[in-house]
Image: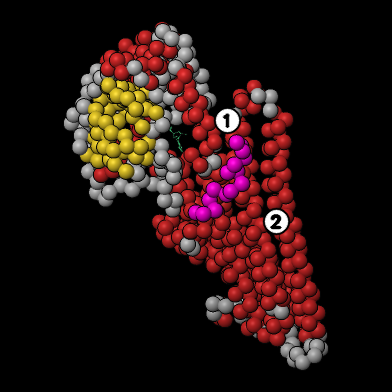
Amino acid sequence: MDIDAGADDDAFEDARERVDRPMLRLFTEYGRGQRGAFAVGLVSSIAARMLDLLPPLLLALAIDAVIRQEAAYSLFLVPDAWIPPGQSARLWLTAGVVAASFGLGAVFHWSRNWGWNKFAQHVQHAVRTDTYETMQRLNMDFFADKQTGEMMSVLSNDVNRLEKFLNDGLNSASRMVIMVVGIATYLFVMNWQLALVALLPVPIIAVFTRRFIETIQPKYAEVRSTVGKLNSRLENNLSGIQIIKTANTEPYEADRVEDSSQDYLDANWDAIETRITFFPGLRLVSGIGFVVTFVVGGLMVIGRPPGPLTASLTPGQFVAFIIYTQRFVWPMAQFGQVINMYQRAYASAERVFGLMDTPGRLAEVEDAPPLEVTEGAVEYDDVSFGYDDEAVLSDVSFDADGGETVALVGPTGAGKSTVLKLLLRMYDVNEGAVRIDGQDVRDVQIQSIRRAVGYVSQETFLFYGTVRENIAYGSFDATDEEIVAAAEAAEADGFVRNLPDGYDTMVGERGVKLSGGQRQRIAIARAILKDPEILILDEATSDVDTETELLIQRSLDDLTADRTTFAIAHRLSTVKDADRILVLEDGRIVERGTHDDLLAADGLYANLWAVQAGEIDELPEEFVRRAVERRARTDADD
Ligand code: ADP
């Protein structure tokens, strides 16, 4: 088996290709709710940048009209009558207006930041929670083939990247547009000939930037893809650390991580090389433009405009021109950076929406009614099913009357868990139907099925939280008394009271470690508290010692007494009292009946029983041969 299988394809590639105009969607679906903040950001940006442009103009005025007194003194919007006559008074007035524009500018810069940040943070929050909710509803298939690292990377990196663009990117973009348009307009009004010279680099920068985008785009895609794989590898290794240690494969794993990290480094470096060449190049182009403007403008001031140019310039205008040109250069150079940010955000938006659009969700009939459980009768009507093309269940038919206990036994991989996943509607049948009290599970609300059917699995996952919270998980309004009563019924109360903080002991990934048997009793308490009409016990007592098993069995007997129960068990002793036993082999029911019926039939069950009861040493040749064949088939599949 190739353990690297699947690591080479980018899990979201298909999804990415299907997404149409992700940035537009981002703004229309998520930006809409934050229109106010967006407007504040935009209007403040315009106001702040306009105020930024004022000081050089006032400087020109001061030089030409106050210091050199070669031009008339007039202030925009201020009536001439208000302007004082003296030279120094005019200088003070000019300085006062400069100070005021800085003061007001600061206020607008504040509200600009407030607006853009509020917009970006809220959109980010909405996108993240929505993506998580969507992901949670996806079909189980999705989680089986997608790496959790990939998922984490969408939920954190990609969502953060969108926020960065919405904040920094929009901010820079608006500054760019305002500065470039504002300055260009002003330059043309002041001196169109020199303005033409100053704007000469613009088309060159445009072409240059376009080339850059085309080059960097595939490189960023590669970076995203390699970081996803690296995360998957790291995540996978951390969860498998015990196996790595016991298998002595630390050097092997270290090499594999190094390879993944090297791929990421290479991809990143490739992108970095392009990026770090681009920005200085851009600066160089704009710098040359600046020098040319300086020379041509200077010649105009001293009355000797070069070539066909005829315009003249005052010293004050020359200074303002130079300052503006310099201010102009930077936003132009930033153009590339904004595009860059946009490209990254675009890729992230594609991944986010790709995940959101994943069609893995089981379709729910519109206005489906909730499941109504009266008897708790379950019917499998000629059910066939496969996770992919290969059939896992074929022609499975059986009934369970309300209150009955049905046991499913058979070799590993026979399809026992799969049968019950269909009852919970984790998957849809390919043929036939599963009905609860006559209602096809496809025709009722999925949530109502999950409410009515309790599930205690072989592996009990404990959430990080207290024991109390873990027992009440899913029955959030249970009282303390009910929680304790459930724990007592599950024979868990005793050990819970001995934990350091009793019911308030933190358990789960970062909390106190519980043994398999203890976890299972918590899961059983959870099921008792939930009090579902139908119960699934998936090897519920597999993980415990014989003594605990007896205790659990006692509490389970109570729990299952008058509710429909499906129990999967390897140890046949735990199910021999079941009302009905179904023996599965290769996705088919090969035998059925009560324990006594099956013993009398002397088939697979009777032989398994004999082995487990120690009556015979091993299965008859025929069964062993079938088991070996089966193994060979599954191995070949892998
Ligand atoms: P059992 O519970 O009897 O051990 P399962 O129902 O778990 O058997 O598995 C039946 C078959 O379906 C096995 O061949 C198993 O490899 C396959 N299978 C189980 N889960 C999945 C899945 N999520 N995707 C693909 N195949 C699966």
Ligand 1's quadrant: top left
Residue found farthest to the left: 374
Residue range highlighted in magenta: 1-15
Residue 137, percent from left and from top? 40, 43
Residue 552, percent from left and from top? 36, 13
Query: Which structural element holds mark 2?
Result: helix
Residue type indicated by callout 2: Ala
Q: Residues within 10 Å of mark 1 (few under 14, many from 20)?
A: few
Residue type indicated by callout 1: Ser
In the image: residue 356, left or right of residue 374: right
When the figure is inspected, residue 382 is found, relative to residue 77, above or below; the finding is above
When the figure is inspected, residue 172 is found, relative to residue 579, above or below; the finding is below
Please give the residue where the numbered disc 2 appears in the rendered image. Answer: 271
Mark 2 or 1, closer to the camera: 1
Which residue does the image show at 27% across and 49% down from the upper left? 365
Please give the residue where the numbered disc 1 appears in the rendered image. Answer: 239
Residue found farthest to the front: 622
Q: Residues within 10 Å of mark 2 (few under 14, many from 20)?
A: many
Query: Which structural element holds mark 1?
Result: helix
> Would residue 13 be counted in the magenta stretch?
yes
| 26 or 504: nearer the viewer | 26
Residue 592, percent from left and from top? 29, 24
| 88 or 19: nearer the viewer | 19
- Whole-number angstrom distance, CA of label 2 to CA of label 1: 31 Å
